[in-house]
Amino acid sequence: MKTNLLRVVLLTLVIFMMNSCSSDSETTTEEIKSEIIETYTYSASELEAMNLINEYRVSKGLNALKKINHLSHKAEEHDFFMIGNNIVNHANFSDRSQNIISALGAKSVSENIAYNYKTSQAALTAWLLSSGHKENIEGNFTHFGISIRENPVNGRKYYTNIFIKI
């Protein structure tokens, strides 16, 4: 009995949603590009991390990556999200990725995160010891961005590094 009632309620809800969202007017759809963030102020540790990554890539015969401020801004947003929620994860990566694809025309997007490393070198060393993170650092990318933010409560650092191919 409860199952049948639930089905009726769900069916009614679906029909209501379909009718309330439909429109009689003719509309045109246009691709809406995301706003590109053009300014970002890099800290010394962020610049050091980028230099270390590029030095490593070049030592392996790979191209050096060019920085894009928009990527560092998206990385910073994620650092603040992790700090604010007291978590370390790739939450909302698909949203970041879609924004980057839309705004910059990226063909591929990847991301490394790290937590509680005191120096950029320590974070890079940890990434290189992890096969997935190392794969991103050595990946077929053209550009990158990075953010390193400190939790004001405990002083621990959060790292987000975004790689893209344009």
Image (cartoon, rainbow, N blue to C red):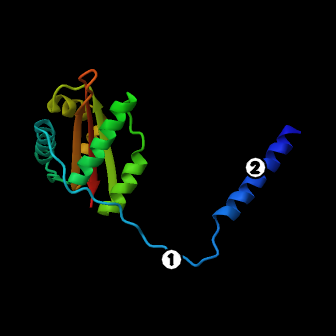
Q: Secondary structure at mark 1?
A: loop
| The image quarter in which residue 19 lies | bottom right
The quadrant holding residue 68 is bottom left
Q: Secondary structure at mark 2?
A: helix
In this view, the residue in front, 138 or 24, is 24
Image height of 140 relative to 136, above or below: below
Residue most toward the top? 154
Q: In the rendered image, which residue does mark 1 sit on?
A: 28
Question: Vertically, is 145 above or below 48?
Answer: below
Residue at mark 2: 10
The answer to which of marks 2 and 1 sits earlier in the sequence is 2
Q: Indicate the amino acid at tag 2.
A: Leu
Callout 1 amino acid: Thr
Instruction: Look at the numbered discs 2 and 1 and tell me whether their residues touch, using CB distance below 8 Å.
Output: no
- Does 34 sit left or right of 38 as displayed? right
Give the residue displayed 42% in from the left and 44% down from the top. Answer: 92
Q: Residue at x 24, y 47 (%)?
A: 72
Q: Residues within 10 Å of mark 1 (few under 14, many from 20)?
A: few
Can the viewer see residue 109?
Answer: yes
Res. 139 visible in picture:
no
Viewport quadrant of the C terminus: bottom left
Q: Which numbered marker is on residue 8?
A: none
